[in-house]
Image (cartoon, grey):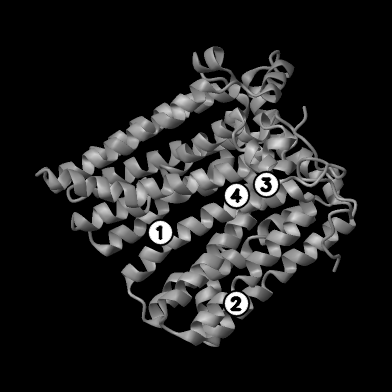
Amino acid sequence: MTAPDATSGTAPATAGADAPAASWRDSLAVYMQPRVLIVLFLGFSSGLPLALSGSTLLVWMRESGVDLGTIGLFALVGTPYTLKFLWAPLVDALHVPLFTRAFGRRRGWLLFSQLLLIVSIVLLALTDPARSPFYVALGALLVATTSSTQDIVVDAFRVESLPESEQAAGMASYVAAYRIGMLVSTAGALFIVSGFEGTGIPKSSAWMWGYVVMAAMVLIGTITALAATEPEQSVRAEAATQTETAFARVLHAAIGAFSEFLSRKDALAALAFVVLFKFTDAFSGTMTAPFVIDLGFSRNDYAAIVKGVGLAATLIGGFAGGFVARRYSLATSLWIGGMVQAIANLSFSWLALVGTNQWALAFAITCENFTSAIGTVIFVAYLSALCQNPLHTATQYALLTALAAVGRTYLSSGAGFVAKLTGWPLFFMICVVVAVPSLILLAYLQKRRHFETLGPVRV
């Protein structure tokens, strides 16, 4: 297996192979660049709606007396997040009347999707889970669809707007802000609902106003989109296709995204690597909560540590991942991310032997969240580098993230059976081993000089 080496002939993630080592001061300064700050606030806007059609909604439904069978079926409303690549070509190719002319190709779609998202959340707020679960499902599906559409645009905007020197910082900021957005729409939303109840408002009305507040917070992303400028790459791509019909643009975006990618050298190996890189994370993450409960920790113990220590570790890990991606070549960064997120599973094997110890739990959760965040930021850097043509950035990125979800959604489905057969200490050791295929593919791609072909986004 090829050892990770910053000078092994791989293209750097950002600054260049001959660039001096980035100091911490330089790394911090790049986070204050206007384009990076724009991406940070858009990351918050992307993370905010996720729980509103997921975990937060399920709490509302349970408190309204909806039976568990019906609640379980609501997992299906997340389907748009896994199928968003199907309509990503429309986002790449079509103009939104009035919006595109006034704000540009990417910003027009961004503002349009955010306004639809606000309307969708308000409509969901007006439903009653106790009386009409069907309309709740419809509202939640609408929120998930508009939210995933916003994700398509934000991903394309981020890839196209940031220069190479700011890509790592932008991705770290995006991941951190995304997590904060999720925290606001989970714990934050629950606190807001409790606050409304404390004023004497009935529970049903408190939930409605809680969701209205969440809808209003989407305006943070809207204001950010208004303050941003259209990416130069997008402007050039728009000029290159202005003489084509809408149908031709959609066709070129859909077909071009696939054919252009598959025509590259070692395309299938790269796609397999995309599927497997986060598999070790997903395989262990599927069983983390059942494992902690099995050890004898309470639900509140787990929630407090995950939302407190875990969130802090995730945010710090995200910025650490950004520093690694900026300091080292892309291949070396992937080696670091792949190894640390695999080895972190051993902390859970140790916890299984130690037993019910809150400090040990906090340590294991910290290791998992910190290393997972490092791996995520570096992985996002790789996915962004694969999307090199602004004519179909949104389509390619949506497709790649859908492939990355295969490990989380399907390959990890057997984790419970493995844990049952092996026991917890050995299970988490196996979680380390399942990272080996991705590292073998990484060594293969590095030997084939795959990373030398990845560069800045270009027309």
Residue 292 appears in the picture as rendered: yes
> Is 251 situated above or below 14?
above
Locate residue 193 relative to residue 79 in the image: left or right: left
Q: Mark on residue 319?
A: 4
Amino acid type at circle 3 is: Trp
Question: Badges 1 and 3: C-beta atoms under 8 Å apart?
Answer: no
Q: Residue at x 71, y 13 (%)?
A: 243
Percent coordinates x, y for residue 204 in the rendering: 16, 45
Element at badge 2?
helix
Q: Residue at x 74, y 55 (%)?
A: 333
User: Can you give x and y, in whole percent of width and height, for residue 298 in the image?
Assistant: 33, 74
Q: Which one is earlier in the sequence, the residue at label 1 or at label 3?
A: 3
Residue wearing tag 1: 307
Q: Earlier in the sequence, mark 3 or mark 2?
A: 3
Position of 192 with respect to 356 (left or right) is: left
Which residue is disc 3 drawn over? 24
Q: Which residue is mark 2?
A: 346
Residue 405 visible in the shown view: no
Q: Secondary structure at mark 3?
A: helix
Residue at image x 64%, y 52%?
A: 321
- Dividing the picture into quadrants, the one containing residue 32 is top right
Cα–Cα span, label 2 and label 4: 23 Å
